[in-house]
Amino acid sequence: MDTLIDFVLTTIASASVSALLLLALGWLLRTWIGERFKASVKHEYDDRLENLKAELRQEGDANLAELTSEIDRQADKLRIASASFSEVQKVIIVRKIEAVEALWLAVLEGRRLMPSSIVASDVLTKSELKNAYSSVLGPELRSIEFGIITKFFANVEDHRPFLGEVIWAQFAGFHGMLGRIIYLFREGKRKPEKLIWYEDENIHRMIGALLGESLLGEFKTLSHSRIQWLNGQFDRQLFKTLDQLLSGREFGEAALRHAESTLATVSRAAPSL
């Protein structure tokens, strides 16, 4: 009986050990398989990641090369455009300087051509001016040629595109006014009241258009040296606009409209020249 019990206990113990061994073996097998699986997945993941990185590097390098090439192409275009623009600007600047030089020479020539008898009359009183033809100024006043007016403009109009309408209006308007003064002195031979040119309505309109109403009011208060005063005002105005032209600053719409108005005023006075 004791022997049977020992056998049973031995068998049970052996079975328990076998079961434990099987459980341990199963756990080890699952762990090994899991580690192999994870290692396999990690290896595949690493391979794919490296491949993806390589593809991205290649794509990035290609995009970078394309972008660099495009930047170089645009830079070349800008360099060519800049060079062309610079050359055009150089030519325009030279033409503007030539135009300004021609304009100023015409201004000086106009003052030289202005009959000295008219310039000298600038100091006469109103009564003296009415009798200018019977004074020492008479002979020279009678010899004034009306065609002298066209000489005031010289070849300045050839440079008009490079001077612009604002400066052209100043020049043309002022010299148109000088032309009317000469006309009034010629008419004064028959009508002495015409010699009082500074009271002429057309002269007033021209001064108002060229210099503004404020300076027109100042002009009306002068008692002598009116031509000298007009020359001085014209010079100051002209130098301002010439400086703006040569500095490359654009004239605004208001200045262009004023230039158009000035030329229209001069044109309306022209039939009386």
Image (cartoon, rainbow, N blue to C red):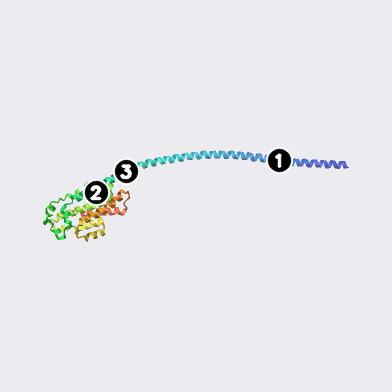
Left or right of 121 on screen, residue 169: right
Amino acid bearing label 1: Leu
**What element does badge 2 sit on?**
helix
* Label pair 3/1, CB-CB below 8 angstroms: no
Residue that lies at the very extreme toward the right in this rendered image = 1
Image location (x, y in percent) of residue 144:
14, 51
In the image: residue 171, left or right of residue 22? left
Task: Name the mark on residue 104.
Answer: 2
Query: What residue is drawn where x is 45% and y is 40%?
Result: 68
Q: Nearer the viewer, residue 147 or 95?
A: 95
User: Would you call the spot at circle 1 few (<14 residues within 10 Å), some (14-19), or many (20 or more)?
Assistant: few
Secondary element under disc 1, as helix, strand or loop, is helix
Pick the quarter of the image with the N terminus. top right
Number of marks drawn: 3
Mark 3 neighbour density, 10 Å: few (under 14) some (14–19) many (20 or more): few
Identify the residue at image location x=57%, y=39%. Answer: 50
Which type of secondary structure does the marked residue at label 3 adopt? helix
Q: Which residue is mark 1?
A: 28
Q: Write the residue at 16% across / 52% down.
A: 116
The image quarter in which residue 264 lies: bottom left
Q: Nearer the viewer, mark 3 or mark 1?
A: 3
Q: CA distance from mark 3 to mark 2?
A: 21 Å
Looking at numbered disc 2 in the image, what kind of residue is underneath it? Trp
- Rendering coords of residue 237 (x, y %): 27, 54
Tell me which numbered mark, 3 or 2, is placed earlier along the sequence: 3
- Disc on res. 90: 3
Give coordinates of residue 17: x percent, y percent.
78, 41
> In 3D space, how far apart are the residues under numbered discs 3 and 1 (Cα atoms)?
90 Å
Foreground residue among 241 and 71: 241
